[in-house]
Image (cartoon, helix red, strand yellow):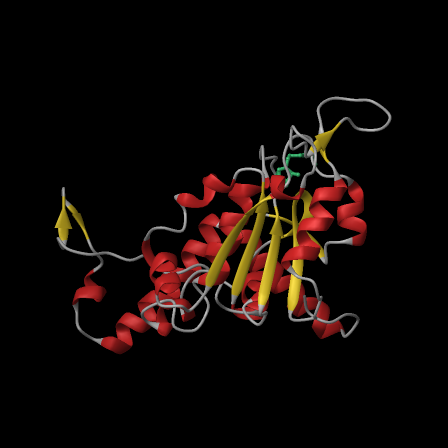
Amino acid sequence: MTFDVLTIFPEFFRGPFEHGVVARARMAGALDIRVHDLRRWTSDRHRTVDDRPFGGGEGMLLKPGPVFEAAETIWPERTPARKIVLLSAQGRLFDQSVAREWTALEGLLLICGRYEGVDERVAEHLADEEISIGDYVLSGGELAAAVVIDAVARLLPGVLGNEESAKNESFSGTGEEIRLDCPQYTRPAEFRGWKAPETLLSGNHEEIRRWRKLAAVEKTRRLRPDLLERRLAGREVSETGTREAQ
Ligand code: SAH
């Protein structure tokens, strides 16, 4: 899969993809990440990418011209297997199910906004989707693009050393199964007087499996009750037959 990133700060991406799983996958050719400097698609002496908003107001906006021209150069042809995504605080919330869905794509082109945002015509006529990584405002789309790439890349075949590790982790279930990963412990078995749960040291695989499942549900209930409520709400709705489970 190929990730293209359009940004006015290409050097921002030097760090995030040079370590760990994503860096190894890149070296092995399992994925490709190409970072493009938006200023390449400007024609004036100052390489201007921004302008004042019509109607007045604070700050500057990214102009549509360079963004459209960049996207049209990077992908001269659009296909359904390639998605143009505008990172935006106003977008649909990115989560693990969106990450999973996008692993089926050939390519993602991620447009990073800056300043007060991006001329709305990019959202209206160029991007397939506007995506937010959470209900807060960042100063630019670069961190958000890095989050999206990391989350999608590690789900691609051959990227995680062990395919099983993606199966049991938090949010890996679908529908009724959605929950957090279970708590994990490593040596020493006793640390500052706090013991790791005995079941995990017992060597009894069936008991360990049962303990993990219960502990995962308990932790979900404690820290993310909304995940369980969503699950119950989905079940009630589908039982009354009025609407499909979410
Ligand atoms: N005026 C905008 C915020 C602009 S922030 C508003 O109030 O909605 C500048 C840029 O940062 C945005 O164009 C977007 O690309 C990026 N950004 C900010 N918050 C984001 C978020 N939660 N998710 C994804 N991108 C975000």
In this view of the protein, which residue sits in the foreground, 213 or 7? 7
Query: What residue is at 28 percent from the left and 77 percent from the top?
Result: 206
How far from the left and from the top, in percent, is residue 120?
79, 42
Give left or right: position of 77 versus 3: right
Q: Residue furthest right?
A: 55
In this view of the protein, which residue sits in the foreground, 75 or 62? 75
Give left or right: position of 183 versus 1: left
In this view of the protein, which residue sits in the foreground, 197 or 3? 3
Query: What residue is at 41 percent from the left and 47 percent from the top?
Result: 16
Residue 135 is at least partly visible in this image: no
Query: What residue is at 46 percent from the left and 40 percent from the top?
Result: 11
Q: Please, is residue 33 above or below residue 47 in the view?
A: below
Count of residue discs: 0
Q: Quadrant of ligand 1?
A: top right
Query: What residue is at 67 percent from the left and 66 percent from the top?
Result: 246
How far from the left and from the top, in percent, is residue 157?
43, 73
Residue 57 is at least partly visible in this image: yes
Q: Please, is residue 141 above or below residue 162 in the view?
A: above
Q: Residue furthest bottom?
A: 206
How far from the left and from the top, in percent, is residue 44?
70, 32
Give left or right: position of 188 versus 126: left
Specify the quadrant of the image occupied by residue 46: top right
